[in-house]
Image: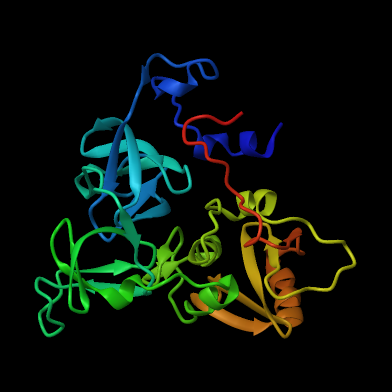
Amino acid sequence: MSALTRFASRLLPARADLAARGLEAQVAAARYAEGERRRVTVPLLDLTATPGQDAERATQLLHGEAFTVYDEADGFAWGQSATDHYVGYVDASGLGPPLPAPERTVTALVAHVYPAPDIKRRPLAALPFGARVAVEAEEGEFACLAEGGFLPRAALAARSDDFVTAAMRFLGAPYLWGGRSMFGLDCSGLVQLALAAVGTAAPRDSDMQAALVGEEPAPDAPPERGDLLFWKGHVGIVAGAEMLLHANARAMAVTCEPLRPAIARIEAEGGGPVTARRRGADRRPAWPPCTASIR
């Protein structure tokens, strides 16, 4: 079984009653659909494995990210994220038509959208790092957005060149299961966002990251800055000088703590030993360009 096949339930747009048209040769379903490309129109949009307001959050989609809808019922759309191929249900009211090209990416941790090119005006919205926008024109220090509103041009600056430094920017951010922003994120969300900051696509969940990002160093190789350490259901970043950076439920925040004591504490508190280590996550793209099929 390939690594991708192991994650099919989260990454394959297929149900017993419906599947993506591109999966006809691979998956049995009652019917198949082409899907309709849409985009997220709200700052953050929860994605769940089942429909319903009380369903557990699996991940979040960011403003402007593309989402292919295969089915819509009772106010929920079922489909697949174009960013990391995660499949699930979202509130259909948070989706709209695709963004016009070219897209720009928000590089500030949080960026306010104003109704006019004036920072004294009350913002219309707060967009998270990684949000996608289309810029129609520039007016002074502001970018005029195609969907309306003005975003400070400083929020669209060049991306980082070091993913550990990018991850450190989230220090103190609250822990949130399934979160992907400064407003709240989990351990694998932090890794995914930090890698995105340097232009490297990464899968969403820690088990996917353990299998697919970077490469496994020699067993006797000492920890290096940028290594990813994995436990069952958890991941942290070696931040240099024997420090571990991670979003964790113990502190309910992104924290940085001494590496060896953290490893011992996690094991003592029931997290078990380190199960995997990956190196060079930012140098080796982790995600294949597939949206409908896993071979």
Q: Quadrant of residue 123?
A: bottom left
- Depicted 100 relative to depicted 195: above or below: above
Name the image quarter holding residue 87.
top left
With respect to residue 188, does 184 lie above or below?
Answer: below
From the image, which quarter does the N terminus lie in? top right
Residue 253 drawn at (x, y percent): 49, 76
Q: Is 155 positioned to the left or the right of 290 in the image?
A: left
| Nearest the eye: 92 or 289 | 289
Q: Is residue 148 visible?
A: yes
Q: Nearer the viewer, residue 1 or 48?
A: 1
| The C terminus lies in quadrant | top right
Q: Position of residue 150 (x, y in %)?
A: 17, 70
Between 230 and 285, the one lying in front of the other is: 285
Q: Residue at x 44, y 25 (%)?
A: 15
Q: Which residue is pictured at 32% across the width and 74% down the height?
A: 155
Total of numbered circles in the picture? 0
Question: Which residue is farthest right?
Answer: 220
Q: How is the image coloured?
A: rainbow
- Residue 214 falls left or right of residue 145: right
Which residue corresponds to the image point at 30% horizontal and 37% vertical from the top-left? 37
Q: Is residue 55 above or below residue 243?
A: above
Q: Position of residue 129 (x, y in %)?
A: 38, 68
Q: Decide if residue 251 is in sight here.
A: no
Residue plotted at (61% across, 50% down): 286
Q: Nearer the viewer, residue 152 or 33?
A: 152
